[in-house]
Image (cartoon, helix red, strand yellow):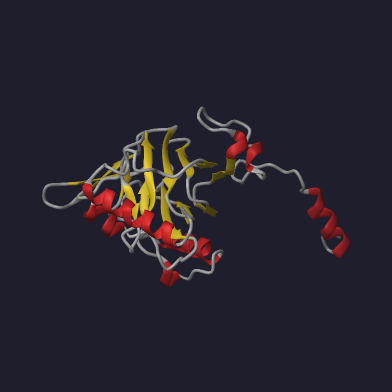
Amino acid sequence: MSTTSTTYGARDHARAQAGTVTEAMPAIPASTWPDPPPGIDPAKLVWAETVAGGGYTHKVLARGTELRLTDVEGDACAHLLLYNADQPWERLNVADTVKVQWNAYLGESIALLSDQARVLATVVTDESGKHDALCGTSTVDGRTLFTLAAAKHGLTPRDLPPSLSFFQGVHVETDGGLTFTGSAGAGKSVVLRTELPVIVLIANVAHPLDPRPDSPVTPLRVLAQRSAPSTPDSPEWTASPEAQRAFENTADYLTARGLA
């Protein structure tokens, strides 16, 4: 007879799993993450997790949190969605992020804009340069994972806008066509700074233009630490006139709500 065929057996089996550690799982508390990279203070960590290829994760982060995404082995693809945690009907607007800043490519000092012309997060540092703001997670696998992650926060498939993709690049040709440019290699990181309290949804699945038949996806490391939001002296504020206006909109919103 199976050891889990009785209630007591099932309980004992479940309790025996305590302390089991696998590669793809969060560290709780995050401060116990075993090998923080330079610039990460373990005492300030609020999220530390490895997301397997084909997996997803989610978290609510405070304003001023630094979120570091790392392509561990060179084939991660971090599809990202952001929502205002206090008013989740305000969410990432990829179209505005691209057109308002006159830039189809993600990189340092790019503001990730909401549909209310406010800044949800900024790209602080970028070691990869291989990202995509045009295709999003248009595969069935990606939409399914986003649906699961969204449900954890009371959101439905109707609440899933187009997403951004980090670590797998796309280049726009002169005729408007899109060319998949792949990864910049293993170990590259991107650091985002949250400018509002946000819900973060991440799906680590193949890019929809990845031409490889097996579309391999490797682990994604997610580390977030307490920090401080941008200020008018930060380079992100003055990266462009359009970004400055979005930051001013954000500051106005925060002041009125007593959050600044």
Residue that lies at the very extreme toward the left in this rendered image: 175
Please determine whether, in this image, residue 90 is positioned above or below residue 102. Answer: below
| Nearest the eye: 177 or 28 | 28
| Nearest the eye: 189 or 71 | 189
Residue that lies at the very extreme toward the right in this rendered image: 8
Q: Tell me which residue sits at (86%, 59%) in the image.
A: 9
Please determine whether, in this image, residue 135 is positioned above or below residue 88. Answer: above
Please determine whether, in this image, residue 36 is positioned above or below residue 220. Answer: above
Q: Do we see residue 6 in this rendering?
A: no
| Nearest the eye: 149 or 113 | 113
Q: Position of residue 88 (x, y in %)?
A: 46, 65
Q: Position of residue 133 (x, y in %)?
A: 30, 51
Residue that lies at the very extreme toward the top in this rendered image: 38
Q: Position of residue 113 (x, y in %)?
A: 33, 55
Quadrant where the N terminus lies? bottom right
Q: Quadrant of residue 6?
A: bottom right
Q: Tell me which residue sits at (22%, 55%) in the image.
A: 99
Q: Is residue 134 left or right of residue 213?
A: left
Q: Is residue 251 left or right of residue 150?
A: left
Q: Position of residue 142 (x, y in %)?
A: 43, 58
Q: Do we see residue 253 in this rendering?
A: yes
